[in-house]
Amino acid sequence: MKTKRQELYETDLLELVEDTDLRDLVVFNDDFNTFDHVISTLIRVCKHTPEQAEQCTWLIHYKGKCAVRNGSEAELKPMCEAICEAGIDARIL
């Protein structure tokens, strides 16, 4: 028979395990979206600061992609959809 303390510990441990399944929201480079459009989209959708959005945009431009956010799939899915609706290629990896 489990004590109340053991049940709480097991519940906390299961919640911790679920939270460690983090994914990346990756934005890919293209030849038609402007820097300003990508920056404003990252600010609006991902709640980036202007500086953070600009740095990510430069990484996307020079490296071909950048992980702009990480989190659970449930958190990232609406962000990914909003970025894609803005005409920018993004995927959860």
Image: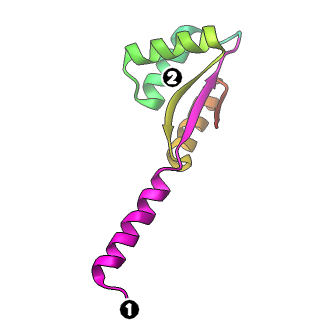
Q: Which residue is mark 1?
A: 1
Question: Which residue shows up at 42% across the image and 61% down it?
Answer: 15
Q: Position of residue 48 (x, y in %)?
A: 40, 24
Task: Judge from the rendering whether residue 89 lies leftward or rightward of residue 18; answer left or right.
Answer: right
Q: Is residue 29 above or below residue 90?
A: above
Task: Judge from the rendering whether residue 42 lies leftward or rightward of residue 6; answer left or right.
Answer: right
Question: Which residue shows up at 61% across the image and 10% down it?
Answer: 61
Specify which label sits upstream in the sequence, 2 or 1.
Answer: 1
Q: Which residue is mark 2?
A: 41
Question: Is residue 27 shown in magenta?
Answer: yes
Question: Which residue shows up at 50% across the image and 17% down it?
Answer: 56
Quadrant of the rendered image containing residue 38:
top right
Task: Judge from the rendering whether residue 57 lies leftward or rightward of residue 31; answer left or right.
Answer: left
Please tell me whether mark 1 sits on a helix, a strand or a loop. loop
Q: Position of residue 42 (x, y in %)?
A: 48, 23
Q: What amino acid is found at the position of numbered circle 1 in the picture?
A: Met
Q: Over which residues does the magenta segment extend? A: 1-30
Q: Is residue 77 above or below residue 84?
A: below
Q: Nearer the viewer, residue 11 or 58?
A: 11
Q: Is residue 73 above or below residue 29?
A: below
Residue, far bottom: 1
- In the rendered image, the quadrant that contains the C terminus is top right
Separation of residues labelled 2 and 1 (CA atoms): 53 Å
